[in-house]
Amino acid sequence: MKLDIIKNQWLDIVFEGRNKIYGAYELRKANGKTTVKALIIGSIIFSFAVAAPLIASFLPDSNEDDVNTDIKIATVKLPPKKEEVKPNEPPPPPPPPKVDQVKFVKPVVAKANEVTEDPPKIEDLKDKKVGNETIKGDPDAVLTVDEPVGKGPVTEIIQEDNNVYNTAGIEVKPDFPGGIEKFYKFVGNNYKTPEEEGLKGKVYVTFVVEKDGSLTDIKVLRDIGYGTGAEAIRVLKKCPKWTPGEQNGKKVRVLYSLPITIQSAE
């Protein structure tokens, strides 16, 4: 008998006299079916893998359906609103006073037929104010009080001290730049003594050191003639400015006296 190995006849020959319940017999017997199933499943998977790109091309692109949800907000500056120009309206009438007001009629001597309005009686003025017109008061109105003095900027008026102080009672005495010795030297170098033989004596001069250091009100109290006093005035007028004196922390005018000793060459 011819044996077909494709079919399962050979299994019976191989497993003849053996335990067919053994797993190898069942596996080989079902091998054909298993192979067919595997081939079908593999073909399906292979076909799906090959056709996947083609299937994907027919599917709608999800990116195209996405809607751009980004919203850009831009601020727009609106033109300024034109203010409506209101016509000139009279101000509202003031509220009625808390106390009744009675118009005061100035008494005038006139004829009886010319009297147009009688003055108020004394009892009509009781607990009432007097004004230019009669106004009915409102008892529920708020009692107004006269406003206090304004709270604007107050300008302090400081009276300038133009008194002339004496050097004896001044807190800070005026001084010449470099000291009083330099002042004496300045006067000695600039004073021109008259050319008179035997001329000697003292010239007494007073002057005021102003707040800015200048010398004013130069006076000669006594001289010895020959223009000695006028020469002293000339020298003091060309004198540099002093450091002014001070009293209570403020610059003041100070009276200063200067004796000039003159002795001509013999």
Image (cartoon, rainbow, N blue to C red):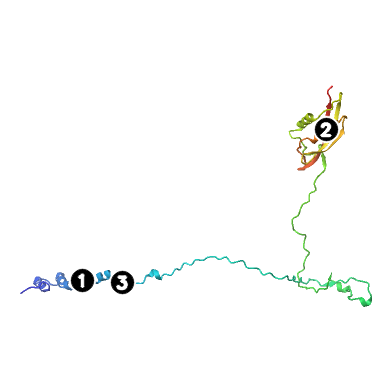
* Residue 245 in picture, x, y percent from top left: 77, 39
Taking 4 as reference, is 104 left or right? Answer: right
Which amino acid does the dot numbered 1 rest on? Leu
User: Disc number at residue 232?
Assistant: 2
Spatial distance from mark 3 to mark 1, Cα to Cα?
A: 23 Å
Q: Quadrant of residue 7?
A: bottom left
**Mark 1 near mark 2, Cβ–Cβ under 8 Å?**
no
Which amino acid does the dot numbered 2 rest on? Ala
**Mark 3 near mark 1, Cβ–Cβ under 8 Å?**
no
User: Disc number at residue 51?
Assistant: none
Taking 38 as reference, is 170 left or right? Answer: right
Residue located beneath label 1 in the image? 39
* Residue 157 in picture, x, y percent from top left: 78, 51
- Tag 1 secondary structure: helix
Residue located beneath label 3 in the image? 55
Precedes in sequence: disc 3 or disc 2: 3
Taking 149 as reference, is 105 left or right? Answer: right
Q: Which residue, as the protein is rendered here, is positioned at the far top?
A: 266
